[in-house]
Image: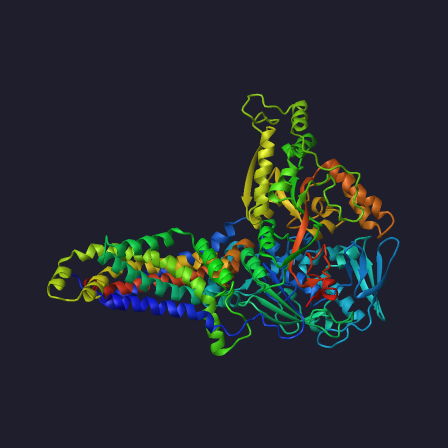
Amino acid sequence: MKIYAFKLLIITASILVVSLPLLSCGSEFDNEGGIVLRIGSTRQFKTTNKFADYWYGVLANITTHDSLIKLDTEMNIVPWLATEWEISEDSRVFTFDIAEGARWHDGEPLTAEDVKFSIEYYRDKDPQAGWMAEVIDSVSTQGNRVTVRLGKSYGNLMMEFMTYAIIPRHIWYEVDEPLKYEGEGRAVGSGPFRLVSWDNAAGKFIFEANPEYFRGKPNIDRLEIYTYANMDALVMALVRGEIDTWWDYSGEFPITHIPVLEDAGGIEFAGATFLGVPAALGFNLEAGEPTSDPVLRQAVSLAVNYGQIAEIVYEGYGSVPGYGFVPPTHPNFDQAIAGMEHNPGKAAGLLDNSGITDSNGDGLREGADGKNLELAMLVRNDMPGLMRVAEMVAADLEAVGIGTVPKAVDSSTWVAAKDAMEYDMVLFRATPWGTLMHAGHASGYFDSRRTGAGVLHNLAAPDYLALCDRRLETAPGGEQAELDRAIQQMHADYLPAIALVWLESVYPYREGWTNWVVDHIYGGVVNSFSWFEVTRVT
Amino acid sequence: MEKHVHPQAVVAVKTGRYLLVLLLIITFNFIIPRLMPGDPLLNIIGEEAYYGAGGALENLREDLGLDRPLIRQYFDYLGGVFTGDWGYSYLYMQPVLAAVAGHLGWSLILILPAIVLAALAGAFTGSLAAWRRKTRTDTFLTGSLLLAYSMPHYWLAMIMLFIFAFLLGWFPLGRAVSGGLEGFACFSDVMWHMVLPLGVLTLSKAAYDHLIVRSSVVSIIGEDYILTAQSRGVSAAVVLFKHGLRNALAPLVTVTAIQFGMLFSGAVMVEVVFSWPGMGTLIYEAIAARDYPLLQYAFFIITVCVLAANLLADLAYRWLDPRLR
């Protein structure tokens, strides 16, 4: 064998590999003029049809589309496409005045007819808006005024409308199957940005500022959104300056990556208390189940070491939650409700006094059937943080003699098992929007009459259901504050679930950007408000 | 007296067997996804939607044909396989063919070169290591490739991403293209993006091929015809690569055909690390979303590719080994 030929082959191959980077044609990060904001996300998008792709729909709500109202940083409802509104005393008639001067990206004027069409279209054709069919009777217009008449009182309509973008009638009126529509104009909206391009292979969206936006041109001239299939690559891109910040709706920035960013330098952080609950433990309240016993649920709540979860899993960014379930960022938060208590001795005492004892000394207490108490805990395995929390909770419960069997399953199996009540305890998370749904303060998760992929629908107590109904019937303001506090108190009394941690969310961004606005609903610094406030310091 | 079988008859019989296997696998492709618990429609409407009202969910179920009896769904699916009507993806809300086509292309762009390069590299290094067995060359080649083989694909991928993309900045941090390019610029851009993921797949597969070929060549080197060639003064390179390797290729062909299917699914971790939009990622998402049509036809494509690879391997055997003709 001619060794020099082999060596020549190796040298040639090495030169080829090393020179390959030179084949790249220019940097995709060259500034083409104007202020460009580059955002990284690990959300994977399938289409630019907001009906067909849940995540694109969320992205569209803060870029290309507008809703009637928004929630500001103080959780107040503020005007957007609706400049003014009136709500009847019985919360059955809602009237909106639509902004003058709003236009669609194709130049057509946005009118009250578009708003009427949008509400009816969602009600009649969007599977995600099934609640509208129960609630909305009719929609009418007069000039730039839209009147929505409900079949029953629904004080939360304003909050619900926050997440429904108005769509152009002239594009969608002929589309019978919105989920399958891939035609022209599907991405046309009235929002501060227009979609210029989406390249799935490049994992890249490009949006350009809408100079004729009815609220004024945004500070950002161009948005580039880069998708990554894993968070590690995204963090590397942030450190290298290939992106300026991160976005994820309803998700938390992984705490484990924060030290890397801090060490790298050039990264700053915005923060806010997460509106949702990143980790919570729900109970099967069906009669006959071990966890239907309120004493057992109370004992479980006392056994968990919340401080340890906050310190170890959330690395100090978590805090001990309260019995009311939702964090203080919620309006009408009831400060009188106690924080979760870690008291294994008290837990053991409660169990002993109720007859749930360890009679054979094997370390596990026996249930009513005389067998060892081993509670099945359903956990989603696509959320690594929750797996760690599950392990810690299991250890805490075992310390007081309650056996726990974590069952890690994928999200679809989790939903099926959860809906079939095939669990004793279920580890879940409550998203920001999820806690505002229904009668608010996470009632959407527990009201047994609700169904949804992420909800427990496990609390059927008549007084609780009546309270939810009363809250839904109440218009914003007035009695709502009292009812909100009552709902939180009922969560503390019934314990359909216990929050395991509250979180101080962290939103990293590269230095040189300033004046970010943190939006509790849409996930951090990337939101409709920031477009008009954020500036680049040169 | 040996019975003579016409070569075309052999091909026909083998093809017939593979078609039967294909039919069985098509049936399994229908059954297995439906054994998984979970409702595919819930993934469409999202986690926070209240789906109990208005019958919207039931309308969607009817629209997608999920309300039909299973046997009817099976025959619809079977018919679709042969007529090209592959139905609608719940996850992508577009025809399955459209959803799959893009991802399949990107997978093949990685897998085919990886298979060829790995086979060539493994054949070369395996032969060399066998020829120089128990020398430093053998120790170095076999030891380093064994180390690469023992590393999980995703771990190797992360290391390469960290060193070559993050620290050195020589290659991009992921994806298949930069976007907005055409012609040769686009081609070279794809090459630039391919280097790291292709390198990982090639190295992982070449390591295995090296071990197979080394073992096979070692068993042949002691044969009389090798000694005869050497004694006639034939050069070492010709003895090794013309006489030795050719007779040792059969196991490599077998392994390559088997690995073709494994690479489709095994590449998912590499695709995630490099954000490469291939079939592995598509299948993983389809499983999580219980997207039955997408799963059925993605598995069908892989099945066809694997069976075709195995059929070609079977036929290649006959070319490699005249005794089988």
> Which quadrant of the figure contains the N terminus of chain A?
bottom left
* B49, above or below A536, in the image: above
Total labels drawn? 0
Coordinates of residue B165 in the picture (x, y in percent): 49, 62
The residue located at (75%, 67%) in the rendering is A117
* A532, above or below B262, in the image: below
Q: Quadrant of residue A7?
A: bottom left
Q: Quadrant of residue A364?
A: top right
Can the viewer see residue B21?
A: no
**Looking at the image, which is closer to me, B9 or B203?**
B203
Residue A316 falls left or right of residue B78: right
The residue located at (55%, 21%) in the rendering is A360
The residue located at (75%, 55%) in the rendering is A134
Coordinates of residue A68 in the picture (x, y in percent): 78, 63
* A150, above or below A455, in the image: below
**Looking at the image, which is closer to me, A62 or A179?**
A62
Residue B162 falls left or right of residue A355: left
Q: Quadrant of residue B42?
A: bottom right
**Looking at the image, which is closer to me, A80 or B315?**
A80
Residue A378 falls left or right of residue A9: right
Q: What's the coloring here?
A: rainbow
Can the viewer see residue A181?
A: yes
Coordinates of residue A65 in the picture (x, y in percent): 71, 67
Residue A154 falls left or right of residue B178: right
Coordinates of residue A185 in the picture (x, y in percent): 66, 73
> Which quadrant of the figure contains the C terminus of chain A?
bottom right
